[in-house]
Image (spheres, helix red, strand yellow):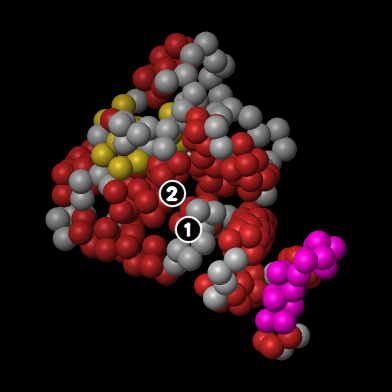
Amino acid sequence: MNDNELKALISLLDDEDLEVVEHVEKQIRQIGGSMIPLLETEWEGSFNPALQKRIEELIHNLQYESVLDRMRDWKNGGGMDLLEGLWIVATYQYPDLSLDKLRQDIEQLFYDVWVDFKDDMHPDERVRALNHAFFTKLKFAPNTKHFHSPANSMINQVMESRRGNPITLCILYMLIANRLKLPIYGVNLPNLFVLTYKDNSVVQFYINVFNRGLIFSRKDIDQYIDQLNLKQLSTFYQPCTNADIVRRVLRNLVLAFEKTGDVERVSEVERILEMVQDEGDGLPLSDYTQR
C-alpha cells in the first residue's frame, strides 16, 4: 500500500461497524511498526476521544511487538552488547529512546572518569579511584527512597537521575570500568547484584556498588550465602552473562509493577522476559526479594 491507501485504511478505524474496525486493526498489526507515524498523525488530527484511545492502544501494541522482536533477536544473536540489551528494556517505556544517544552518554561518563585515572595503579587503587569518580564526581547513588520504582530498571532514567537499584548502578559502573579496560564483571548473587574484579595478576575480589563500591572477598560471599540458607553455587562467585543481567533487570521490573498493582504491565514484561529466558533459569529472582 502507498501512503494514501494506508491513510484511508486508518480512517476506517472510525467506522461505526465494529467488524470493519476489527478487520482494519488486524491489517494494521500485520503491517507493523511502519504504521506508527501515520497513526500518530491521525491521532493528532482527531477530536474523537474514542478514536484517539483506539489509536493509542494500537500504537502501544505495535511498539510492544517491536520490543519483543528486538529482545528475541538480541538473545539469539548472542547478547554481545549489554548496553543494547538495556536499551531494548528501556524502549518498553521510552519507545523513542536513541541507542546512539545512550552510547554517547556512556562515552561522556567514561571521559569524565578517564581524565583523573592512572593506568599504573594497583587494582585496589583503581577501584577506589573509580569509586571516587562514580559516587563523588558523577554523583551516582542508591535510590533507597524509591527502591521499587520501575524507573530504577530504565538505564536512561538512572543516567538522568543518577539514582538506581543494585543492578543498574552496577551496569553503569561496569560499562565505565570496561571502557577503562578494567577486568570487572557482573555477579548474580541472590537478592543482590554485585561486581567482581577478576584478573590472573591479582586475587579475585568483589565490589558492592550499592554500598558505594565496598570491596569484599569470597569469604564474605560464603557468609552471605550461609545466612540465606542456600547451597554455595559457582554462579554466586563467577561472572555472569549479559543475558543473565538483562533477565535480572526484567525480573526487577516485573516486581516493580507488581508493587504498583499494574497487572497489565506485569504480564507484558513477563513476555519480554520469555524472549531471553533459558531452560532451568531459576535463582536469583531479583534484587528486591528478602529486603
For mark 2, what is the residue? 154
- Counting from the top left corner in percent of width and height, residue 130 is at 23, 46
Q: Range of the magenta residues?
A: 6-22
Could you say which disc has been placed on residue 94 in the image? 1
* Dot 1 amino acid type: Tyr
**Secondary structure that dominates the magenta span:** helix
CB-based contact (under 8 Å), mark 1 and mark 2: yes
Q: How far from the left and from the top, in percent, is residue 43?
A: 57, 70
**Measuring 61% from the left and 36% from the top, which residue is drawn there?**
263
SS for callout 1: loop
Q: For the residue marked with disc 2, what is the amino acid?
A: Met
Q: Residue at x 68, y 41 (%)?
A: 278
Query: In the image, 243: left or right of 228?
Result: right
Q: Nearer the viewer, residue 184 or 276?
A: 276
| Quadrant, the N terminus | bottom right
Q: Magenta segment: does it hold 39?
A: no
Camera sees residue 19: yes
Please tell me which residue is depicted at 63% across the width and 45% down the height of the picture: 268
Left or right: 155 as drawn, with respect to 50: left
Most extreme residue toward the right, as rendered?
19
